[in-house]
Image (cartoon, helix red, strand yellow):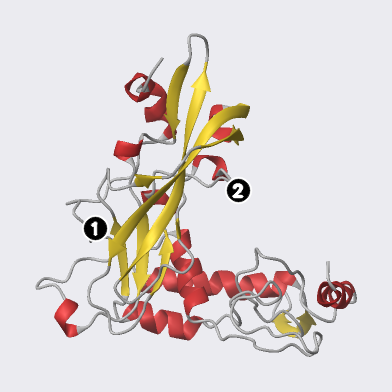
Amino acid sequence: MNQADLRRVSQIIQGRLGSNYGRGIDLVVPGSDMQVLNADESGSYNIAGTSAATALATSGAALLQMVTDDVLAPEDIQGALRAVARDIEADHALPGVTLTGYDKYTGAGECRVAPAVSALAAGRLIQCRTAAGVATLGDPQLGVWTIPPLNLDAQLCYAYEATADVTFPAMVATPSVWGVGRWTGGTSLSNPNYGEGWCEVMPGSLSATGCTLRTYLLKLVIGWPVVELWWPCAPEDLTFGYTILGEVSVSGMPETAPSRAQDQSAVSSVQRPRSLVEWCQRKTNYVTGV
């Protein structure tokens, strides 16, 4: 922990500056001197803390769902709010510390719901899913990972980085892009996410024309004689879900505008990856060698 971290923690403990810090922060939301009504609406009083900030953040998320007919994935809400956040470049409690861009003290910046609503209402959000079998696998990493849905703790696995290059419609400028777990067959190594799908845009790969998506597959080595099973899915079944938030140029507009949830890839319809139950029922299809 460096001196800036120590100053931040000191401010948090004193109740003078925020409630948390770290790489998991997405946004900052007002949470001090928030005026609320009494239960009987006879008067008001001020509150502070995460209880106040959470109400603003969740109401903003609900508003985004409302203007999009409830089709947003959790990552879409998170991504849209982060994309339009007002960057906080300096903090009075951290003199001399540059906070430009994403940082562990203020995340992507100050939460702004109105610009996110405007962008989504204008139809600038495109939900996409790749075809299956487009992934490229990297070299295997032998290690031990926990797979919560299967109750398999400390399993010896080979982890494979799986990547896919995707191309965007013609965009006016470089869009904001993020992975969507419910349409992705891979998982995260740092957090298996309890069986939920996960992928991300590889750092440095995003441009106005496309990006590289990354997820991970695990190959389990079980029993004797040895049986190798892929989890959460086999490479040939792997798909990547992602969302684009940006303005499509006139030349990139389709003749018939797709619905918000329509697939934008070579797949004709959006189908969720095989669930854990299906994987267990059909696991013999994933045997790659003995």
Instruction: Work out which quarter of the rendered image holds the C terminus and state it.
Output: top left
Quadrant of residue 175 in the image? bottom left
Amino acid carrying mark 2 in the image: Ser
Residue 42 visible (yes or no) = no
* Left or right of residue 248, residue 74 in this image: right
Q: Residue furthest top?
A: 225
Q: Is residue 228 above or below residue 266?
A: above
Which structural element holds mark 1? loop
Q: Please give the name of the residue rendered at 52% of the width and 13% of the height, measured from the top-left corner.
A: 223
Most foreground residue, 10 or 37: 10
Q: Earlier in the sequence, mark 1 or mark 2?
A: 2
Between disc 1 and disc 2, the foreground one is 2
Distance from disc 1 to disc 2, alpha carbons, whole Å, reads 29 Å
> Between 287 and 25, which is closer to the camera in this rendering?
287
Whether residues under marks 1 and 2 lie with C-beta atoms below 8 angstroms apart, the answer is no
Residue closer to the observer: 138 or 118: 138
Neighbour class for label 1 at 10 Å: few (<14), some, many (≥20)?
A: many
Say which mark, if any, is on residue 186.
none
Establish if 97 lies above or below 213.
below
The residue under label 2 is 190
Q: Residue 263 shows which numbered tag?
A: 1
Q: What residue type is labelled 1?
A: Asp
Q: Position of residue 28 (x, y in %)?
A: 65, 77
Q: Residue at x 72, y 79 (%)?
A: 31
Find residue 274 and report its horizontal and vertical position in percent. 35, 36
Where disc 2 sits, the SS reads loop
Identify the residue at image location x=60%, y=81%: 109
